[in-house]
Image (tube, rainbow, N blue to C red):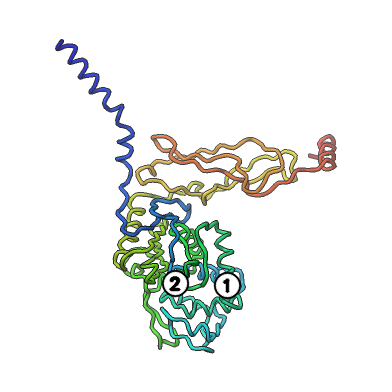
């Protein structure tokens, strides 16, 4: 009996690890930070990977974080040549009448687009936001229409704007933490905007009006790149905070926090979580990906691109000793659509695959018509190809 009991205990001892992998895997996951705010999200900017989410699709008033979209439309206008940073903007009576955060813009006063952007980014100036909207689209109403159109283009399903400032308590004006993260990511793709969103202190009007950033993380959080604060009595304390270290940039969005201190603590905890536990790993080493031969197409081959910006976000412990393997067919038959999936890039470490990214067609290749195919066959017969 003792021998039988001993054998059973030995078997149980040996079998015990077989029941542990699920819990062991859970234990190995990085512990998510405690976030007091009811709505929050953390994403990595280049890949858009979501690392933390809590109430991320709940519709809430965003207060002045609304101005992320306002700044995005202005940044896009600058980059497409519609606006120039040294263009002069004249304040209207309506712009000058805005309350809340402002620079006390006077009707008829002129400031450059650059100074207006600075005032919106640094002190959340409602008067400058409206002045820019009117200058760009003729009226704030027309600008708001464009804001909603851009939101739809970005796939923001829980966002609707009724003004360009977020100042007014309007139940029809709402967004969510995830949508703010997406529009913030788009804004940060205009790298020069960080020249404004990282300002701690500056001035306008030849030094007569001083500006201090409402986002204290700009001064106190290492690598902070912005981005926008907000507060109303209904929205409470909101923030889209971004920070970059060693080429990896995260965006933490907080909505409806109880205080500035709580808002900043939540955002800092999320950013710390990203930097401590994840690493952005380039996949292509700057080298062009292989082309794929195309049969019956108006081009003989099509290039490939890696979905996700050519990088993958991995847990730090999984990012060592990476190898990459490319899986593509020898050829495809036209037509080929730009963005069509052609294969995959598999990333592995010593433990096995850790990520897979689609390889997409870099361009469209149309199918040849019957006459073109006939001429190509004649060329082949004649030895011309």
Relative horizontal placement of residue 288, taking residue 104 as reference (left or right): right
Tell me the mark number nearer the camera, choosing from 1 and 2: 2
Q: What's the residue at 38%, 66% (across, down)? A: 238
From this viewpoint, which residue is outermost toward the front? Answer: 171
In the depicted structure, whether residue 186 falls above or below residue 5: below
In the depicted structure, whether residue 52 falls above or below residue 183: above
From this viewpoint, which residue is outermost toward the top? Answer: 1
In the depicted structure, whether residue 221 falls above or below residue 354: below
Quadrant location, the C terminus: top right
Relative horizontal placement of residue 246, taking residue 374 as reference (left or right): left
Residue underneath mark 1: 143
Q: What's the residue at 54%, 69% (across, down)? A: 75
Instruction: Rate crowding at label 2 as few (under 14), some (14 to 19) or many (20 or more) other CA atoms within 10 Å.
Output: some
1 and 2 marks in contact (CB < 8 Å) = no
x and y percentages locating residue 185 in the rendered image? 48, 60
Report helix, strand or loop for mark 2.
loop
Q: Of 229 and 232, which appears nearest the observer?
A: 232
Residue underneath mark 2: 169
Tag 2 or tag 1, which sits nearer the N-term? 1
Q: Of 99 and 307, which appears nearest the observer?
A: 99
Instruction: Rate crowding at label 1 as few (under 14), some (14 to 19) or many (20 or more) other CA atoms within 10 Å.
Output: many
Quadrant location, the N terminus: top left
Tell me the distance, in whole angstroms, between the alpha carbons under discs 1 and 2. Answer: 19 Å
Report helix, strand or loop for mark 1.
helix
x and y percentages locating residue 314 in the rendered image? 41, 46
x and y percentages locating residue 150 in the rendered image? 57, 63
x and y percentages locating residue 259 in the rendered image? 31, 67
Q: Of 197 and 376, which appears nearest the observer?
A: 197
In the depicted structure, whether residue 129 falls above or below residue 347: below
């Amino acid at each position: 009996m003792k021998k039988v009991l001993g054998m059973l205990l030995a078997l149980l001892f040996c079998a015990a690890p077989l029941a542990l992998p699920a819990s062991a895997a859970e234990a190995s996951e990085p512990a998510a930070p405690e976030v007091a705010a009811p709505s929050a999200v953390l994403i990595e900017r280049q890949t858009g990977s979501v690392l933390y989410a809590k109430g991320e699709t709940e519709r809430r008033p965003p207060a002045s974080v609304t101005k992320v979209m306002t700044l995005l439309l202005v940044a896009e206008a600058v980059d497409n040549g519609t606006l120039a940073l040294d263009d002069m903007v004249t304040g209207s009576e309506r712009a000058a009448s805005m309350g809340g955060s402002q620079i006390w813009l006077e009707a008829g006063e002129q400031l450059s687009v650059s100074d207006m952007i600075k005032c919106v980014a640094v002190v959340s100036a409602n008067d400058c936001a409206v002045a820019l909207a009117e200058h760009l689209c003729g009226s704030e109403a027309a600008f708001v229409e464009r804001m909603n159109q851009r939101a739809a283009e970005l796939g923001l399903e829980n966002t609707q704007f009724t003004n360009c400032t977020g100042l007014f308590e309007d139940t029809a004006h709402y967004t969510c933490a995830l949508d703010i993260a997406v529009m913030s990511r788009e804004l940060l793709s205009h790298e020069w905007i960080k020249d404004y969103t990282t300002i701690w202190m500056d001035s306008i009007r030849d030094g007569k009006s001083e500006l201090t950033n409402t986002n204290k993380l700009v001064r106190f959080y290492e690598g902070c790149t912005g981005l926008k604060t907000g507060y109303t009595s209904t929205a409470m304390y909101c923030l889209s905070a971004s920070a970059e270290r060693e080429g990896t940039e995260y965006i933490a969005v907080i909505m409806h926090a109880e205080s500035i201190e709580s808002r900043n603590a939540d955002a800092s905890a999320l950013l710390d979580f990203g930097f401590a536990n994840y690493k952005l790993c380039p996949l292509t080493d700057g080298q062009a990906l292989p082309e794929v031969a195309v049969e019956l197409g108006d081009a003989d081959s099509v290039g490939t691109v890696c979905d996700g910006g050519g990088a993958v976000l991995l847990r730090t412990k999984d990012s060592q000793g990476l190898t990459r393997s490319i899986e593509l067919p020898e050829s495809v038959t036209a037509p080929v659509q730009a963005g069509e999936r052609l294969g995959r890039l598999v990333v592995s470490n010593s433990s096995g695959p850790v990520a897979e990214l689609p390889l997409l067609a870099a361009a469209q290749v149309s199918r040849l018509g019957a006459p073109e195919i006939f001429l190509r066959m004649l060329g082949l017969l004649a030895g011309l190809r």
